[in-house]
Image (cartoon, rainbow, N blue to C red):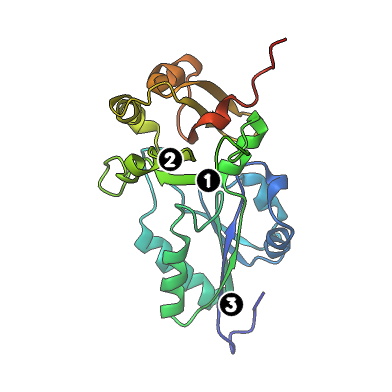
Amino acid sequence: MNSNLSTPPELYVLGAGPGDPELITVKGYKILQQAKAILYDNLANRELLNLTPPDCVQIYVGKQPYGKYTPQEEIHSLIKHFAFSKGSVVRLKGGDPFIFGRGFEEIIYAREQGIKTYYIPGITSMQASGLEDIPLTHRAISEGIWVVTGTKKDGTLSGDLQLAMQSNATVVIYMGMKQLASIAATYVHAGNGETPAAIIQHASTPHQKSVKGLVRDLVTMADSKQLTYPAIIIIGGVVDLGKPVEV
């Protein structure tokens, strides 16, 4: 990582993975060991900060669920400050930075400031569904994956869900816990209320919790296990594949 300010400063946009610190990539591990300054999110496991050198500046810039958050403009300002003052800065983001993570927004900003950028992918949370015996695709059950946000910038449910429901693909919804009732109603209205569904919270961590049922019952499912954010919602036939085989 660059420490010579006679050359362009650097930004590393790094995916922290779904929660388990051991799921970070080898490349990400090496970047953290050399970090001079790190800006980390709420969903990045704090244990990863222990990999950084003792003199690494660590600043939290995350967002609490439906609560206080660091404005994106302030994050941009911090990126610029530490990139030029330290020579390099690591932006550590939960999951993968380019999947509902605003990672590319920060890449664009940094490049506009003359900062050299690097993207290090991370395992996104939907891939941890396998820990609950839910493969995202399975032959003859699901031929693809729709990945949608449950809440758009204006707070409404993504219209892409209407399109996703028309196929037999697995539907994965990020940031949808506030929209459970709307998601369920959308499926019921389309005659698909019997579709299997699952909610997984804190995927890949010791605190992982989940529930399976039918999409029409999403609200009661979440209430039964007291599931909240951060969680992913998975809808489709793959949800039932892990059920014990009756003999």
Q: Residue furthest front?
A: 140
- Image x and y of residue 9, in percent: 55, 79
Label 3: element kind: loop
**Quadrant in the rendering for residue 66:** top left
Label 1: element kind: loop
Q: Is residue 198 above or below residue 60?
A: above
- In the picture of the structure, the residue carrying the numbered disc 3 is 87
- In the picture of the structure, the residue carrying the numbered disc 1 is 144
Image quadrant holding the N terminus, namely bottom right
Amino acid at the residue labelled 2: Ser
Report the front residue among 69 and 157.
157
**Mark closest to the chain's N terminus, 3 or 1:** 3
Can residue 118 be seen at all in this image of the molecule?
Answer: yes
**Mark closest to the chain's N terminus, 3 or 2:** 3
Amino acid at the residue labelled 1: Gly
Q: Is residue 155 left or right of residue 164?
A: left
Image quadrant holding the C terminus, namely top right
Q: Mark 3 against mark 1, which lies toward the viewer?
A: 1
Name the residue located 37 percent from the left edge and 59 percent from the top edge: 72
**Mark closest to the chain's N terminus, 2 or 1:** 1
- Image x and y of residue 121, in percent: 60, 59
- Contact (Cβ within 8 Å) of mark 2 with mark 1: yes
Q: Is residue 53 above or below residue 137?
A: below
Q: Which mark is residue 167?
A: 2
